[in-house]
Image (spheres, rainbow, N blue to C red):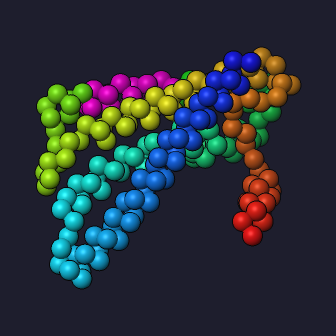
Amino acid sequence: MIINTTDKLLIKLENFLNGFSAIAIFILMLTAAVQVVSRKVFNLPIPGYIDIAEQSIAIFAFLSIAYCQRLGGHVRMEIFLSAMKGRSKWVSEAIQTTASILIISILMYFSFKHFQRAWVFGDSTIDIGLPTWPSKLMIPVALATLNLRLLIQLAGYIRLAIDPKLEPIGVPLIKDVVEQAEEEAAQIELIK
């Protein structure tokens, strides 16, 4: 099935972007520790540390957004959706996802225009003159990945709206508190 194949391909991209984001956070955390020690102990701060930190915010604020959407980790109005069953639930999900696709498409367009302006004008940071276009490009890339995830979910919701008895593919499932607690307990047991 095309939804399943596309979902598996996008999962690889989402996992890569999420891993890249995690590594960037770790490197920034180490850099912050070095910055604090070198400033306090040696009175020798890292040149342009603030510029680097500001530009890296786009990495960990946006690159994992599609990964989080796939897992159903974003804040949603699950009170109403969890009360719905069958076709009405999947139609409601499809409507909500369509609205999300439209909004994300608008944000993607204007964030890309913002990147283009930074590229054309040679926008850079104040302290060390670091170009800002790479961080500004990450936002439309992350939003495009999110839109791909939303399109897969929309296809999955439409498929389930047509036949609610089918196995859900490519859509996050709402879990109640008991299911979430059991999953977290299982993960803790794996760590031990």
Q: Is residue 160 left or right of residue 16?
A: right
Q: In front: 127, or 96? A: 127
Q: Is residue 104 left or right of residue 121?
A: right
Quarter of the image for the N terminus: give it: top right
Residue 77 visible in image: no
Q: Residue furthest bottom?
A: 41
The magenta stretch spans which residues? Answer: 101-115
In percent of the image, x 21 and y 31: which residue is there?
A: 119
Residue 184 visible in image: yes
In percent of the image, x 35 and y 71: which residue is there?
A: 33
Quarter of the image for the C terminus: give it: bottom right
Q: In front: 175, or 52? A: 52
Q: In front: 186, or 73? A: 186
In percent of the image, x 22 and y 65: which residue is there?
A: 46
Residue 42 point in image, percent of width and height: 20, 80
Q: In front: 93, or 74? A: 74
Residue 145 is one of the magenta-drawn residues: no
Residue 144 point in image, percent of width and height: 46, 28
Residue 103 point in image, percent of width and height: 45, 28
